[in-house]
Every structure is written in structure tokens, then in C-alpha cells.
Amino acid sequence: MDASSPDGPVKDLDVLIVGAGISGVGAAWHLQHRCPDQSYAILEAREDLGGTWDLFRYPGIRSDSDMYTFGYNFRPWVDGKVFADGPSIRNYVRATASEAGMDRHIHFSRKVTCASWDSASARWTLHVDGPDGLEVWRGRFLMLCSGYYRYESGYMPEFEGLSDFKGELIHAQLWPEGKDYAGKRVVIIGSGATAVTLLPAMAQEATHVTMLQRTPSYIAARPSRDAIADTLRKVLPGRLAYTLSRAKNVGLAMFFFALARAHPDFVKKGVIKQIRKELGEDFDVERHFSPPYNPWDQRFCLAPDGDFFEALKSGKASVVTDHIDRFVPEGIRLKSGEVLEADIVISATGLDMLVGGGIDISVDGKTIAANETITYRGMMLSGVPNAAMAFGYTNASWTLKVDLTAERVCRLINHMAARGHDYCVAVPPEGMETLPLLDFSSGYVQRGLPGLPRQGATPPWRTYQNYVQDMLAIRYGRLEDGHLQFRKAGAKGEAPPELARAAE
């Protein structure tokens, strides 16, 4: 329904979803199927859907989670590849949106700049830069599905001597599709999932590819096909086979994570032993593949069918562990004095974390700083009414948590409609101990933590990175738990009498 404001026509709907990536499309599916009476729109800043999988175009781009858990729980992944390439994932998201009709609700080229909540009317008002100028959208509930990093640019360190370099420096996040690197000498700066993906892909055409790392990462070879899943598909109905394969992979991931936390030395020895088996005793595995941190203090890097190690064994690629001194005309000079000659240097140095796409959020005229809030069940921010954000797991597939978040939002919307509530807001106990949102030592996380929300030390404010625990709490836990307050329009923060008494 359209209304009007001093800024022009207003689009007034029940739910506004920001972002048409894998999170936004998934959230829309749950909304359509669980809250069919709710009107909604998806506002997407870019010109196409897919989010990360439309933005990232670097060579070899693929998932670093298995597709049986990265795929939606409601739409089986039937391609067969465990680690799908970027175009396949983009097509999967596009097909999901098209088949269920969500694509008709997506409004492209609309960047949300600010979102303001008014308790008197129990409505969000969004200011949006649209193709024809400013647009105003209003909604009862806001879902932030724009991911956790800045789309415009990734993290780029300040490299001394860069102006002297005669080659080309490209950040992986901004890789120009169709870039010709055949016959070129390539240096990749970084050791994370992006670098581990780039090296084997580019080694096929480049003269030589060198991965330059300051610190090693844990890298494990995994089969590109899931033999058990393939067998199940042959003997069982597709949906059942997918569900069982998904459950198996969730269980294995949880087991391995728990094992790594409980016995890090044992897991580390096992990983290094496997790498030594891949590369042979003559390779300096201890130097290049033995991180100074414990397994799962940072995310594991996966090499489908060991492609990363195969590239190293072929002689088309190599790993150098050192620090950069400065760029020189012919490439990069290291602290050791060695010069890595390069025609193209790729900075795979990570993301620039950003909450809610950088939208300016205010509640009843007060600006909300994300780092002054606390996450409730890993999906809502304290003091921010009728709003949820999609934030996936760090130790498992992103989509597992996003699906649960969307389910919980739908439960909330239906609960409020049935009980006559206009909005809900998460209110933490007075003086509650808080912790960093993420327990991860990765560089991009450590750089981003000061700007991120915090989490509580106890549930429901604590995020445990445990799918089964979250599933039980989010899918079946009480909605009126004393931490989530339900209110009528016009209320601007007064606590219910029973909560006020409890706090005394």
C-alpha cells in the first residue's frame, strides 16, 4: 500500500528484507510459507540477486562449506558437487527465488541508507537510494540480510613502495571478471580460503602462482563428491536422501569442531600428518602448514580432491612463508631479502566487516551504535524493536543459522499477531557480563570486533555456535522468555511491572 510523506510516496508493507543474497531469499521463502498473510519486499542495493555469489568473480570461486549444509533446508541441493562453484550457487539462489515467486518481490538498485523506528506507530521507516532518487519504505518488521562485510571494498593493507611496482595489484573481492592472467607470474598475498581457492585455479593458466603468507592456515583435503550422499540418492526419495545427508554432515562437523576444541594437539598432528602424506617428506610442512594457533581458532580451509596440494606438487605453484618488506618494480621484496617477481599481485587479505550493510539505525530518534548493543539468540540487537539480522555460523555453514533465524522471526510475527502485540524488543538484564561476539582469531574478525555487537555470557544472550542447541532453542524455545518484551504501539521503553520489580 502506498501512502505519502514530505519525501514523496511511501511503500507500506508488513516486512522489509534488506539484501537479496542467500540469506534474504531464504528469509523470504520462510515468510511466504510460514506467514502467508504478511506482505513483504526485498530491497537489494545491487542490480542482481545472489549477494556474495554475484559479487565475487575471482578464479575458482566456490563454497568453503559442503552444499548439503550450505544449501537451504527447504530446497535440496541436487547438483552432486560437495563444494559448488560460484556460478552454480548463484543459479541455485536464483532458481529458488524464481520457483517460489520471491523474485517478484525483489526491488533492485535500492540501497537502504537509514532505518528509523517509531514506537508510537510501531513502524520502521527506511530511506532508500533508488534508481530515480529517494524512496521511502515503511514496515512493521525489518530483516537485515545484507551479510557481515562491506561490499564496496575489501581490506587492503598499506604496502610500502606500491607506487614503484610495475605490475598490477588487485583485491580478490574486486576481481575484474574475464581478466587474462595466462602466462603471467602471480603472487597471492594471504593464506585463507580465498588464497587456497585461487592458487589451484590460476595455476592452470599462469606461468607460476606463489601464495605468500605471514602465517600458515589449516588446510584439509576433502572429496568433491559425497559417496554416502550419492548412494542415498540412488536408493531413497530425493528429499529424504538430502535430509539424511544434511544431518550426517551437520553431525560430522559438530563432532570435528568439538574434537578440535577438546584435543587441539591431537587434531593438529592429524592434519599435518595428512598434509605430509599429500606433499611428501621433502616438503617443509612444518614451516608452511603448521599454524601457531589451535584448530578452529580460525576457519579451516578445504581443498576439494586436494587440488591445492596437487598444484604445489605440479611445480606450477608454491608457498612462501615470510613478511613483506616493500614492493619493488619487479614484484615484492621480503624481509628475508628474497624478491618475488610478479606481473599480477592479488590481495587476498580479507574482508572489512560491517553490520547491517552500514545502515544508520535509530530508535525513537536515538542513534543506535551496533557495538553498544548485545545480541539476543544471535539474531536480534538489544533495544532495537521488531528487527532481526542474518548472521551465520563461523564453525559451520552460514545458511544453517540463517534458516533458523528466519524460522524464529516467523514464529515471532505469528505470535504477535495472535496475542495482539505490536512489537517486541530484547532487553538484557542489568549489569549482565558481556563477551566479544566472535571467538575467532582471524585478522578480519579481530579488525572488525570493535564495531560489532557483543554477546552475553549466558543464554539467551550467548551464541554457542552449535546448530542442534540453536535449533532446539530457536525452533521450540519459549518466545515470552522474560528477555524479549512484547509491547503495544505507543510504548517507548517502559518495562513491564514484573520485570521492573525483578530488577530491584
Image (cartoon, rainbow, N blue to C red):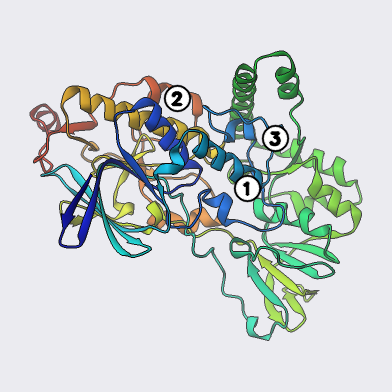
Q: Which residue lies furthest to the top in this view?
A: 235
In front of the other: label 3 or label 2? 3
Q: Which of marks 1 and 3 is nearer the N terminus?
A: 3
Disc 3 marks a residue whose amino acid type is Val
Image coordinates for residue 83, horizontal then vertical, percent: 69, 39
Q: Nearer the viewer, residue 479 or 328?
A: 479
Could you tell me if the residues under marks 3 and 2 are in contact, i.e. CB atoms within 8 Å? Answer: no
Can residue 480 be seen? no
Image coordinates for residue 186, horizontal then vertical, percent: 77, 68
Disc 1 marks a residue whose amino acid type is Tyr
Q: Mark 3 points at which residue?
A: 82
Give the side of residue 273 with respect to residue 71, left or right: right
Neighbours of disc 2 within 10 Å: few (<14), some (14-19), many (20+): some
Image coordinates for residue 293, horizontal then vertical, percent: 63, 48
- Name the quarter where the C terminus is drawn: top left
Q: Which of 330 and 202 is in front in this view?
A: 202
Q: Is mark 2 on a helix, strand or loop?
A: helix
Give me the residue at 60% from left, 24% from top.
251
Could you tell me if the residues under marks 1 and 3 are in contact, i.e. CB atoms within 8 Å? Answer: no
Q: Mark 1 points at which residue?
A: 293
Disc 2 marks a residue whose amino acid type is Met
Give me the residue at 62% from left, 23% from top.
242
In front of the other: label 1 or label 3? 3
Q: Is mark 1 on a helix, strand or loop?
A: loop
In front of the other: label 1 or label 2? 2
- Name the quarter where the N terminus is drawn: top left
Neighbours of disc 1 within 10 Å: few (<14), some (14-19), many (20+): some
Give the side of residue 385 with respect to residue 467, left or right: left
Using the image, determine if residue 244 lies above or below residue 482. Answer: above
Q: Earlier in the sequence, mark 3 or mark 2?
A: 3
Give me the residue at 46% from left, 49% from top.
147
